[in-house]
Each structure stands twice: as structure tokens, then as C-alpha cells.
Amino acid sequence: MAFASSCQPEDAPAGRSSDGDGDGVPEISDLCPSTPPNVIVDAGGCRLGLASDTVLSRLPGFGGSDSSSLRHTGSVLPSPGDTTPPPGFVRMEVFFGTDRRPLDVTGTAAFYGKEIDSKLHFGSVVVSIPKRHAPGAVEAPSLSCFGAGMDPAEHVALLEIHPLDRPVWATRLRSALEGAREPEALVYIHGYKRSFERAARTAAQLAFDVNFPGVPLLYSWPSNDEAGDYTADYQATEETTIHLADFLNEVVEQTGAGRVHVIGHSLGNQALMNALEVISAARTDTLFENLILSAPDVSARVFVDQLAPRIIRTAARTTLYARSPDRALQVSETLRESRRLGQAGDSIVVLEEMDTIDASKVDTDFIGHGYTLTTKTAIDDLFMLLVNRHAPGNRNLDAFSKDGLAYWGLR
């Protein structure tokens, strides 16, 4: 499905983001500039009438033979035989699983809400990456308003959502993996206070920025996406456990992915730990090429004393990114009365079976929590890890030791 919108940006650049027919698609990108009111349109501004399991459509002028638009084979949707000059953005396809309950808001970006459902939902989304995209940014208008406020040539925008039945989803993901530069899957699990829309945009941005050669995936658990709802979000990470375990097993067993990489961010790591406990209780084989714990909002004591042996054995390589100060984790430490795994400093967690990366030197924002997704230094290191497959000693890192064990630091 695609989206209709009635909102307008406050700061639309003159002559660029005007929208004469009010369908939410800027005039410069609108292929159907006289769409009637209240019509659901696709990213090109034309009437859309796709069934939920229809193959993703290509609009004239979206993509092309320009090599820059084909940077991620298998992730970017190519345009066979299309010689139309490419637009100012790349279309990224992200496959997803979620246990958010669908809402009766067809045609909006809020299709998946904040309540948990009794079952998993599968599908794919299409997200725009502007050609003038800055690594680490999830470009958006100053007033976060989907539709007219989101210009694909300027913003990382959610353009389409395609709900799919599980078997259809697995078949299409398998096909995407077969067509990718590498048959690899990158699963992103978001953190606290994230809507489905924001998580989908970040999943696309992350895969694009690290130049991932396979297919990006998103698992979206039912975060409330509201400040002050930390307790409710923490509870949601418990409730999503079985669904996330099911999703990860599905990716490993049913899609034909040669390598599966999993990155959890912030509170999403609590959901990930819970799911991996379930999985490791049922099987002892190595499932993932990389398990990346990014600023994990997880008890450091519980991880070291109880979880680490079972969690680490699920992956060929496990990497922890930690930082101090991380003010979000400082708040969590106070609320949970337990130091968090993503905190660095004198108590940084260093284990023989895990690569610990100290990101304390990274120049980031005041909060200091989203650095793996937003800073060039961390993104470059993820590229070296995921794409070049380099161990820490072969990356641009400083070497340290703690209690006789090596760990590393971003410069």
C-alpha cells in the first residue's frame, strides 16, 4: 500500500515541494499532478490499487540504469530496461516482521500501531534514500509530517508498505537474496520509543550507509513511541519474546540466506536476549554470522553471570558497542538499579568470546546513545565488520586491555 496525506511542511523549499493536487507528493516528483481529492496514491502521485500480496510496483522514473541507483543489488529495486534519468533518490526495499497490531488506518504510515498482536505479521516496505543523503542521517522535514512533508529526493521517507502472508514473504525474500550481490540478511531490531515508520526508515538508512551487499530486514516490536513510556516499552520486550524467536528462526531456516547478521539497538537488545535464550534452549548450532549489541540497555551483571555463554554461542562473532557517557543508559541504570551493558568506563564488559568496542571517543550528540547509527566513525567500523569481514585487529581501532583481555576503541 502507499499513502495519502493532508499535511503540508512548514519549510518546503520554494519551487521544489509544492503540491498542487494535495496528494502528498511534491509537484516536482508527481507523475499524476491532477489526482482527485482523497485518493490513495503511490510514491509517484498516481492512484494505487494493489492487493496486499502484489509484487512491488515500479513507477516510471523511479530508479534507472545509473550505477549509483543500483548501489545495493537486492536492496534497491532496479528498473529493467528503463532509460529514464533517475530521480534524486534510491528506493530501498526492507523486509519486515512485526507483532504490532495493524490499525484501521489504511493509507497512512501508522498502519502498525503500538499494541501487541497475538501473531506475527510479515511484509516489505519501500524507503527512499536521497542521493544527497549524509551518512548517519535519517533526513526528515523540520516538522515530522508524513506525505507532503516527506520529499523522497530530500528525505528518508517511508513510501510503501506491503503486508504479505508468511509463505509469500519467505518466497520473495528468498528471491531478493538470490538477486543480491551477496545472499546475506541484515536484521535490525530497534530500541525504545520507536514507531514502525521510524524503525523502517532507520533500517533502510543503516543498510545503505554500511553499503550492505545483501537484503535488509526489520523486526519491529510494539514500542509505544512516546517519551515517558519506558516501563511499558520494557514490558513489551518481554511480551515479544516468542514472536522474535519465531522471526529469527524463520529468517535462518526458510529464506536461504547464506549469512545472517543481527544488530540490536538499545532496549531492542533486551528483546533480542530474551529471544536468543529461547532459541539457544532448543538448539546449539551457530545461527548468525554476526551478533551486534549496539548500546544495549541490558543488565551488565545479568549478561555476564547468566546470559553470555548461551547468547554468544548463537553467532560466529559477537560485538558489543559501549560508550560513556551514554545519558540514555544512565537514566536506565537509575530506573533499573543496574549498570547497563552498553556503558563503558572502568566497568566496561570485556569477555574472551566477545569483541568489545569502546565508542567513548566518538563525537556524537549530547545524549550519546545512537552513535552506531549516526556517526561516520561507527558506521565505517560496521562496514569493516559486516562487508569486509575484518576482525577488530584489522580495523581502524585502538587496542586496550582489561584483566588480560583485549578490547578496542573507536578513534
Image (spheres, rainbow, N blue to C red):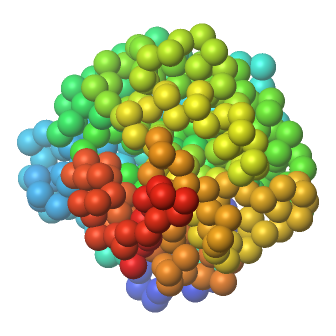
x and y percentages locating residue 172 in the rendered image: 35, 23
* Residue at the farthest front position: 404
Q: Residue at x 39, y 79 (%)?
A: 411
Quarter of image, res 329: bottom right
Q: In this rendering, does residue 97 appear at all?
A: yes
Count the marks: 0
In the shown orientation, is residue 17 left or right of residue 341? left
In the shown orientation, is residue 309 left or right of residue 217? right
x and y percentages locating residue 261 in the rendered image: 41, 38
In front: 356, or 127? 356
In front: 369, or 18? 369
Q: Residue at x 11, y 57 (%)?
A: 67
x and y percentages locating residue 194 in the rendered image: 69, 54
- Image: 80 above or below 140: above
x and y percentages locating residue 370 in the rendered image: 58, 67
In front: 179, or 299? 299
